[in-house]
Amino acid sequence: MNFVSMAYAIRTGPVRNQLLCLAVFLLVVALCPLVMNDYWLRLMVFVFVNIGLASSWNLIGGFGGYASFGHGVFFGVGAFAGAVGMVRFGLPLPAVMVIGGALSAALAALFVPVFRQKGLYFALSTLAVMLVFETVLQRWTFTRGLRSYDLGWTLAPSLPLEGFFYLFLGLLGLIVGSIIVVVRSKIGYALHAIRKDEVLASSIGVRTTKYKAITFMISAAWPGVLGAAFAPFLAYVSVQSVFDVSITLNMILITIFGGAGTVIGPIVGGIALSIIDQIAWGNFLEYHRLIYGALIVAITTLHPGGLASVFWGWVERRRSAAKPVPRPSAPGHPPTSAPRRA
Amino acid sequence: MEDVLVYGLLRGGIYALAAFGFSLVLGVIGIVNFAHGALVVFGGLLTQYLAVKFGVPYAAAMIGGALGTGLLGAVIQRLFVARTFTLEPLMVLVQTFGIATVVTELGTLGWGSEERMLRLKTGLPPGFMLGDTFVPSFDLVVFAVSLVSAAVLFVVLGRTEFGRAIRACRDNRESAQLSGINLGRTFEKTMFLSGTWAGLAGAMFVTLSPVAPYMHFSWTVDSFLVITIGGLGSMLGALVGGLVFGVLSFGASFYAPTIAPAITFGVLLVFLVFRPQGLLGAGPAIRK
């Protein structure tokens, strides 16, 4: 079995095989601390968090086609839940992670009325909610800091660096695993229909608002969990550090770069952009943002499906070269290129 | 209270100018242009550059800055957006955001990242009293110019062949093409118009407040807010929205400066939930 047909078999095969692949990938990455120093381990943690956030965003933005431009609010709320919970109430890390996820999901549930509107309004209102929360969390003395003059939270790192590495690697596995399962479930099929043509989907009995709301809650809960776990790693949590617009933008960029609406997209995009980031920081510090922006323009203009579509396009070509008559593809697998607007 | 109303309205004229192009592009091409704020800032800095570096009189610099920005918009449309506007809206959002980053970074490399402002010596009296409120006459002139340019845009869109083509493409793309309208060229002209008025907004704003490349995103968001308040797909809505937004944002930062953004965006949320078509919107203009 050559590489091309193996990749194709995994993509169209049962969920079990995909999860197995994920497990193998995680196990290989789990060996990294044996050969890496502290700098690279810290960097890997950031990469895990970025991929985890992008994968969560991909669920509503990529698979559902509803771009959330304030997804950073869920990460921020999670981080503040972690900081407030651990410092003010002395809760353990697992407890604040659950609280962070639950708070974010509850916040996402408030968006149900907006889901009856068009995607553009959704994008705007998520952005607005983020800016509202940013201001409120900064002003409210309960969340601003422990003492009345504090502007942030100082946390003691509750785990050694290797501990954080495995914690975030495990979380990444859970997030990607849950997305693999969700995409192949009834929710995933409903999302596919909504993304292709929402009016048509609702006319044949897909309860679009319900599925959008469920998806958005899942997609919001994971950044909440990640945020809460990230708080002790960051050691100092303030509005400036966890509500930065670049957190949301990174989620979107990583997803689009890798391929929106594919499970592998955010993973590939996260790794690729991190490598580019490292090279750009190291060699052309002045032009760092310029290179980033130019890359985004290039990928969206030339290959809107992202790196994943480049890869799958190559696989399809190899397959059709090997077999003159292509088989009809299996139902329900994600589209290779960005679908045309209806 | 009168202060807030007067100063808010005076600023609102510029917000309306910035929002016209945003609304036009959204209605006609059907995309959300995240590079719109970058165009506003580019127009402001180009005007300042022309006036300071080459000593061009302000009126000429303003027109030069506006036309230069319009040209940049048309180039963006031809090279980039023309390839992606039929894809999912998300793609264009991300693409135009990338363009905004590139324009901003190139602007920073060329002009520096500091805040710049253009102080004009107009020889006008400093201002007059309206009741208990001091009205600076220069701001009033800027407001009047913004209203005049809004009127020009209305005439261009409503009375000329060019405007009719643009409106035809907005209302029904296929029919417009069947009537012999070149879709690609019309979109480029739309983007030119959008960029020109964005540049004009920047050119006027730079005489009142400092402008710097990093401000581009807040201009995009503000334009977004203006047309949400005013209503999508309606030029009059953008004008009304701009004035309302001017009063709202000025009032918020006047009465509650610490939580001003929260108030502005809270009002936006109320609009989104209860009146998503805005004050004067023609109903949902886009499908997704």
Image (cartoon, grey):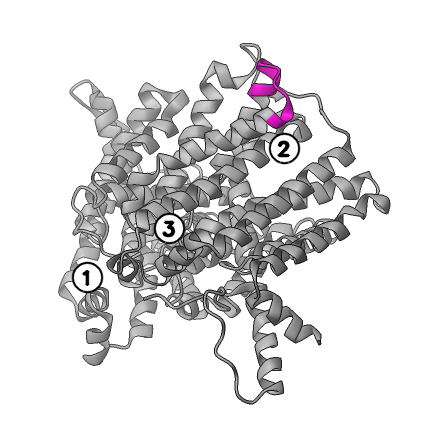
Give coordinates of residue B33: x percent, y percent: 38, 55
Q: Secondary structure at mark 2?
A: helix
Q: Does A151 appear above or below B104?
A: above
Mark positioned earlier in the residue sequence (3 or 1): 3
Q: Which mark is residue A230?
A: 2
Kindly identify which chain the residue marked by label 1 belongs to.
B
Q: Which one is in front, A318 or B67?
A: A318
Host chain of mark 2: A
Mark 3 vs 1: CB contact within 8 A: no
Q: Secondary structure at mark 3?
A: loop
| Main secondary structure found in the magenta portion | helix
Q: Is residue A244 visible?
A: no
Which residue is at a point 20% across and 69% down the rendered structure image?
B172
Rendered image: mark on residue B157: 1
Question: Crowdedness of circle 3 by 10 Å Cα count: few (<14), some, many (20+)?
Answer: few
Q: Is residue B268 left or right of residue A175?
A: left
Magenta segment boundaries in residue numbering: A84-94
Task: Residue A62 in the image: state x and y as whole percent.
Answer: 46, 55
Q: Amino acid at mark 1?
A: Leu
